Image (cartoon, grey):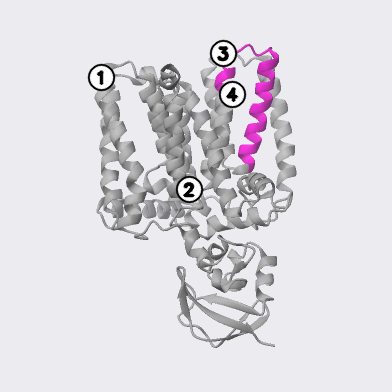
Amino acid sequence: MKRIISENYHWICIGIIAVVSFCFYSYLRYPLLNSDDALIVMMAHYYDFPHDLFFWNQSRGGAVVPMLSQVFIKLFHFRAVTAVSISTYIILFVGVCFLSSLIRNKNLKILLAVLWFLPFQRFIDITRFYIGLEYAVMAIAFYLINKLWDADKTSPKAKWMMVCTVITMIIAVWVLYNALFSIAILLVTLLIYNGRRLPHGNVILFAVTGGIFSYFILKFLYSFNTGYCPDCNKINNWENIMQALNILCLRYKEVLLFQTGEWFVSAHTYLCLLFSGTLIWFLIRNKYFGILIKEKWIVFFFLDFCAFYGIHLLSNWVLMNGMGRWYYVACYISLSMCILLIFDRLNEEKKIKNLRFALYFVVFTGAVSPVVTMITHFPKTLKPMERNAAELKPLQPCGIIAEWWNAYICSVADPDNVLATPHQDDDGYNRNPSLAYKVARMDTVYLVKDMWLESFPNQTEQFGYTFKKDGQDFHIGSWQMCRYIKKK
């Protein structure tokens, strides 16, 4: 028994870390859950295959979590928010398992789980945003490629692994088309590290046929995508790039000068900078770059980090969204893997021992940063947002009309009895028009004032229907609301 535990203690630790993360950051438990998250819950609740292969009215993002959630909703009759929480963490856990296969040291595998499930506050969206899910799927391909590298390419097992690699990459691109960039970088890296030798004939055959097969499969999948986003693929001009850099510099400045009010985030940022500088100095001084550059996975993740940092500077869509930190989850994952692999490959070097303890300290202090920030800065509570939505029960059944960030989130606890939609002037955020008109056809609706109205009007028109104010406004859950009755 002791031998089994000693050999597998890292899996026990990874499981515990995943459970702790679930208790703080899953859809069921996260205090800062928003309407972007609630959209996924509602998609799971109303799921319609194959029309819901992509997120409602969006031109990107495969709805892998709503699809997987159907297992728990249909078979076990779980609420949508519970099913989505479990499904997300299953995918994330799979990602950690396969990514950890690239790391030899068991303690570093545990650190990977901490970085993944308990990330630094600025990258907490890895636990819900589909960039994290994309890398979780890509991790399966990394594992297969690593197994294939020195394997006999003519064996039936190797051929099946090649097929699975192609299928995994197709799924990753469906989850988020940004995976195409990572795949391109990976292929170039593998070709370079294959040396002067041509790839094995079977590898070339599977690569070519897999590429053609992937093209037609993805073209078919995207035929179900009804969203249209002309700005999503626009490239920034020089002026836009400078604007993006100015936004990033302003964000860095605010954090470094403790201007955000998040003192723990600022302090940890200095800690990360000090650690990064020390690590670079250590590698240069001891001339370890010659050793590390021979490792294809270190080079791949470093190139992936650099590529996405540049891609986000060039992306007009990222700029339009204020250079949101959730986009940089890709950079966070790649840089984290790069650093862990460096420590893993230099594990036998005695000189790196003290620096390894510094790594542990940086990672574990970063792990508590989201909770500290929520308690001390915003929202100053750990009460799950799902519980706020559950407080709307006395109003059920009801329809709710609000600004985007206060709309779908109201439905997250009980989509059957609380129907919500962004108001008609928030048209760009009306992800499901049929749901909007379903709300508007109800005889009684509730308007949410927050981030939309200065005061409740006596009468309002929404989606072709006129509603008249009925009674005084009141506070419930996290929202200021007022009841309205449809005017006949």
Instruction: State which quadrant residue 140 falls in.
Output: top right
Quarter in which the C terminus is drawn: bottom right
| Residue 327: numbered disc | 2
Residue designated by label 4: 144
| Residue 351: numbered disc | 1
The stretch of residues the image draws in magenta is: 146-174
- Foreground: 249 or 46? 46
CA gap between label 2 and label 4 equals 27 Å
CA gap between label 2 and label 1 equals 35 Å
Q: Earlier in the sequence, mark 3 or mark 4?
A: 4
Image location of residue 50, percent across then percent down: 74, 49
- Foreground: 485 or 146? 485
Q: What type is the residue that disc 4 sits on?
A: Leu
CA gap between label 2 and label 3 equals 35 Å
Q: What type is the residue that disc 2 sits on?
A: Tyr
In terms of secondary structure, where does tag 3 sit?
A: loop
Residue designated by label 3: 150
CA gap between label 3 and label 4 equals 11 Å
Whether residue 261 is visible to the viewer of this picture, yes or no, is: yes
Q: Earlier in the sequence, mark 2 or mark 4?
A: 4
Q: Earlier in the sequence, mark 2 or mark 1?
A: 2
